[in-house]
Amino acid sequence: SGVAIIVLGAIPLNGLQLVQPTSKAINYHRRSNYEHRLNLFKGMASNVDDDINREIADAEMSPFDKLKEELDNGGSLKDAFSAYQKRKKETSGDYENKLALLTTFRSYSNRELLDSDHYTDEPTLDDLNQSIPSKDKTIWASSLYRISVFVSAFFVFPFICQLLSTFVEIKADEFDIVNEQFTPGIGILYGTFVALTLDILYERQNKVQENASIEASLLSQVTQNVLNLFRDQPQIAREASQIIADQVRIIVYRPRGAEMLNIMRADPYARLLSLIDHFQRDNKKFTPQQEAVIDGLRGEIPALMEARAKRLSDEASSLPPTHFLVLLVLTALSLIGFTAAALTVADDAGQPSFESRMVFAALCAVYVLFYNFCRDMNDPFDGVYQIKRSSAASFLLQIKWLIASQPFGKDVRFDTRGLPPEFEGEAVEVGKGAGKVEPASTGLPERNAQRFAPTDSAVSHEAQSNEKSQVITADTNTITVTEDGSTGENTIIEAQHKAKNAAVEEKIQSLKEKATGVSF
């Protein structure tokens, strides 16, 4: 009898008939438990590369280009002049704006290593070579430049003294007051300001370098765990790898503004976390190794976000132009103080001594060197004093090589957006009259949907009498959701339980009738 009960309980699962879907359904196009699809958080796009390219192209336009563009578009001369003034204002000032975010150079590795030509090249130590900066960024550190500053100051100093003695008439005792009070005070202020500037810039460079290395290391670990987790599901692994490739491309050579826009609208880390969330939701059984990998990823991705936030914060802490203007003013005041002191020992014609000219030239050379040194350190990605990228670059190249070595590696692109995502987007049909979004529009392959309902009389009667009941779908791309939010998966489970209970009750009734001879 136990065998009969089991057989009867299985009947509703085998007796299914085709029915048409109802018009009140909300269809989420999603793969079955064996094929996963990424459902992004609401408002999160899959890619914003086109918007980034448009913004960068607009940021590269000069004020004159904006004026010409406005005139070409049929705008008035007033509007064109306003566009010119707006762009000119954006190119100067201490505040952070879109133009500054998109035009400031930033790079953590050699860009050409991500090109398709080098995609299958095995990483070597040569790939860690730092690119040579332009000469206009390093000329201040050359011996010829420093000698030219020294010689120029040596020959210019007599003219400065003569000019100052012509326009400024001051007694000898008043010179003593200037030398004893003004010059030492300016010297102390200048030294303090320079020390503070260098301390800020040194700390900033160290933090940028450290946080970039930490983020690249964590991203490498996440890549290995993702490839391990989705080893048997290449489509999901390809999608996750492309998300990682998008972030690598941003880190390697995209400006900060591009990364900011990417975070706001298509955050790769949020997309990766969403993929893992839905993979865990759609699969009920995991091996201990898979559970350990998922737990590791859930800890590593938030750590990645934290490292990225620290890196972006340190990158944004550059010193504004006003800071260097103050440095220039203090330098000029210090030189003026020395010139005033030199006038007390000048001859009757106002010419300084040879020793004074030598000291003035040395001071000018040192002041110019300090100024250029501070300006150079304010840009950690260009010039003489750059951050050391070898640590971060090695992890980024490891990521590229790991992905390129996979069977689907040829489909993942680091220099462009890659193939259209198969698991991105949200296809939704809500209520009556709503336009249905086909699977093809989301990158999913077309499939023939088959919808089934159990033939069991009790279940079928209940489904017909309740307007909010929902048919069960066997489509691998679609799970139908009722108006109250219950999914087709829940509906089929309820139908199975009801059918089993009905079969068990029927069998009990039959056994009672046979035992007692009485009909119930």
Image (cartoon, helix red, strand yellow):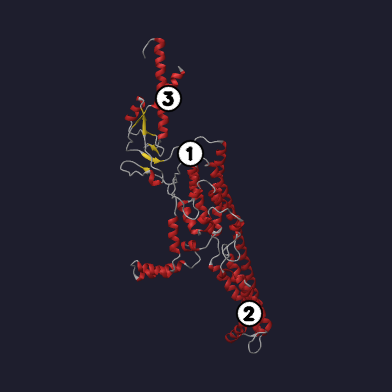
Can residue 298 be seen here? The reply is: no
Crowd tier of the residue under label 1, counting other residues whose Cα lies within 10 Å: few below 14, some 14–19, many 20 or above: few
Single out the mark in the foreground, 2 or 3.
3
- Circle number at residue 281: 1
The residue that mark 3 highlights is: 10
Depth check, mark 3 against mark 1: the one in front is 3
The amino acid pointed to by label 1 is Arg
Helix, strand or loop under label 2: helix
Which residue is identified by label 2? 151
Residue flagged by tag 3: what amino acid is it? Ala
Instruction: List x then y, in percent, for residue 83.
Output: 40, 67
Q: Name the element at disc 1.
A: helix
Residue 328: % across, % down:
57, 72
* Labelled pair 3, 1 in contact (Cβ < 8 Å): no
Q: Earlier in the sequence, mark 1 or mark 2?
A: 2
At label 2, the amino acid type is Val
Q: Which quadrant does the C terminus fall into?
A: top left
Q: Which mark is residue 515?
A: none
Residue 471: name its quadrant: top left
Circle 3 crowding by C-alpha within 10 Å: few under 14, some 14–19, many from 20: some
